[in-house]
């Protein structure tokens, strides 16, 4: 049976080039980068070469790149490392749980938070951020691209607000990396988190841009690794893999690969929307869809439960998602879609399709040959299932 993977926002496979770049650092060049002997210095050189690649990726100085375990650590570091009792932070109600849960945890330490709601199309308006600022506000944390809808936020406008009010600005860029050019200088942020496994790199590796002069306290303490920003022996192979994935991502943005991916996404979306009782989550009242990451669409299916459709499509070889992989199996509907104003029925009837940059026309063709039949079959069963509920 043919397999098509449309859940790239959950994770992506390693590209062959990434595997080859990492291979020597598992076996031949295994040294500890803190050691002064030759094996250690070979590892150190690989890390610093990788740091230079990530500095190009972010458009920042090499000293402003800190390697870590991924997006969750990066988000946690930004919040726990900048905020102190009595402070107030602003974030949105559609953030990843790495930010939302961290904010709630900080509230137990006398740190206030405000969750700003999006417009119905998923956009956080700069005006809503401005209205939320209080005398004790210290940090704004807003994601670049949403993991469920793909909606891209106006981070440059929010960066201007942060600059004009003297606030620190963190961006969760996990879903934007590799799909949108990142320029931290142009955005005007102080911190920007990314994760390798979302861009065809290895799991358990990530990086955070920390602008020089940002008074960030270390989340993990111990040795003097990463300029005392993040203790722990460096994952050399993972760092090399992240750098290679970032290098390939920059090429994909420059050579038109991501533009082609957007066209594939649009064709898949149009094919699904040809079915009755469907629509895109991320559109305003006029039907205009907000700017999105090139690979992502979130579609609702009337009279369906997303979990049932995920299973039905998986049985036919098409992997999709009902929302964030971090909340798989959750009883409650997507907090992102609910914050956008969807009722529980529609939120539970929504699927996320997120394509890898290696997706093909044949993948889309196959998915479109499977989805209509699966939807029709489940809708026929829906009245029967409803009648059996006690």
Image (cartoon, rainbow, N blue to C red):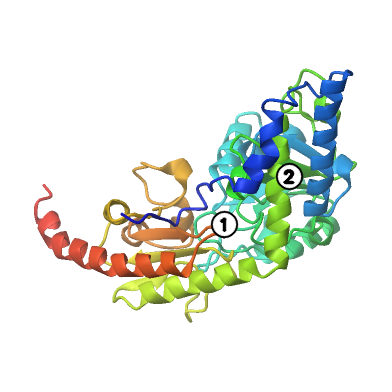
Q: x, y percentage for residue 130?
A: 72, 60
Q: How far apart are labels 2 and 1 at the CA level?
A: 23 Å
Q: Are marks 2 and 1 in contact (CB under 8 Å)?
A: no
Up-down relation of residue 48 to residue 261 (above or below): above
Q: Earlier in the sequence, mark 2 or mark 1?
A: 1
Q: Is residue 358 left or right of residue 36?
A: left
Q: Residue drawn 59% across and 32% down?
A: 105
Q: Residue drawn 54% across and 42% down?
A: 97
The quarter of the picture where residue 353 lies is bottom left
Q: Is residue 303 left or right of residue 273?
A: left
Q: x, y percentage for residue 74?
A: 68, 39
Q: x, y percentage for residue 333?
A: 38, 51
Front-most of residues 260 and 159: 260
Circle 2 is placed at which residue position? Answer: 243
Front-most of residues 215 and 232: 232
Look at the numbered disc 2 and give the secondary structure of its residue.
Answer: helix
Q: Residue drawn 73% across and 38% down?
A: 240
Q: Residue extending furthest front?
A: 28
Q: For the residue carrying disc 1, how many other residues have a C-alpha within 10 Å: few (<14), some (14-19), or many (20+)?
A: many
Q: Residue drawn 83% across and 28% down?
A: 42
- Quadrant showing the N terminus: bottom left
Q: Is residue 203 left or right of residue 183?
A: left
Up-down relation of residue 229 to residue 157 (above or below): above
* Viewer can see residue 130: no
The quarter of the picture where residue 212 lies is top right
The quarter of the picture where residue 257 lies is bottom right
Viewer-side label of 2, 1: 2
Front-most of residues 311 and 147: 311
Circle 1 is placed at which residue position? Answer: 146
């Amino acid at each position: 049976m043919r397999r098509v993977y449309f859940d790239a926002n959950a994770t992506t496979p390693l590209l062959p080039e990434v595997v080859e770049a990492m291979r020597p650092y598992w076996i031949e060049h295994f040294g500890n980068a803190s050691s002064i002997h030759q094996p250690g210095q070979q590892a150190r050189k690989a890390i610093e070469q990788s740091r230079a690649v990530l500095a190009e990726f972010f458009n920042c100085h090499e000293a402003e790149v800190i390697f870590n375990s991924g997006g969750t650590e990066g988000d946690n570091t930004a919040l726990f490392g900048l905020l102190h009792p009595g402070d107030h932070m602003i974030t949105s109600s559609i953030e990843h749980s790495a930010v939302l849960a961290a904010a709630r945890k900080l509230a137990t330490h006398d740190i206030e938070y405000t969750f700003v709601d999006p417009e119905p199309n998923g956009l956080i308006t700069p005006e809503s951020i401005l209205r939320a600022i209080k005398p004790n506000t210290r940090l704004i944390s807003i994601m670049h691209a949403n993991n469920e809808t793909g909606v891209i936020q106006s981070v440059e406008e929010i960066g201007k607000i942060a600059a004009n009010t003297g606030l620190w600005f963190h961006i969760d860029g996990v879903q934007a990396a590799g799909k949108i050019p990142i320029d931290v200088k142009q955005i005007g942020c102080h911190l920007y988190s990314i994760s390798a496994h979302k861009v065809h790199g290895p799991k358990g590796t990530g990086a955070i841009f920390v602008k020089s002069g940002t008074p960030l306290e270390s989340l993990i303490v111990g040795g003097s690794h990463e300029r005392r920003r993040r203790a722990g022996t460096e994952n050399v192979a993972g760092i090399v893999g992240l750098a290679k994935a970032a290098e390939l991502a920059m090429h994909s943005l420059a050579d038109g690969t991501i533009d082609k991916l957007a066209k594939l996404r649009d064709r898949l979306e149009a094919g699904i929307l040809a079915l009755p009782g469907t629509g895109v989550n991320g559109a305003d009242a006029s039907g205009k869809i907000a700017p999105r990451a090139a690979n992502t669409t979130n579609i609702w299916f009337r009279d369906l439960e997303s979990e049932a459709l995920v299973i039905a499509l998986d049985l036919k070889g098409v992997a999709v998602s009902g929302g964030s992989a971090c909340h798989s199996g959750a009883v409650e509907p997507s907090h992102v879609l609910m914050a956008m104003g969807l009722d529980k029925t529609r939120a539970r009837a929504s699927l996320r399709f997120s394509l890898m940059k290696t997706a093909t026309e044949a993948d889309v063709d196959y998915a479109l040959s499977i989805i209509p039949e699966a939807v029709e079959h489940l809708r026929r069963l829906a009245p029967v299932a409803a009648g059996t509920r006690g």
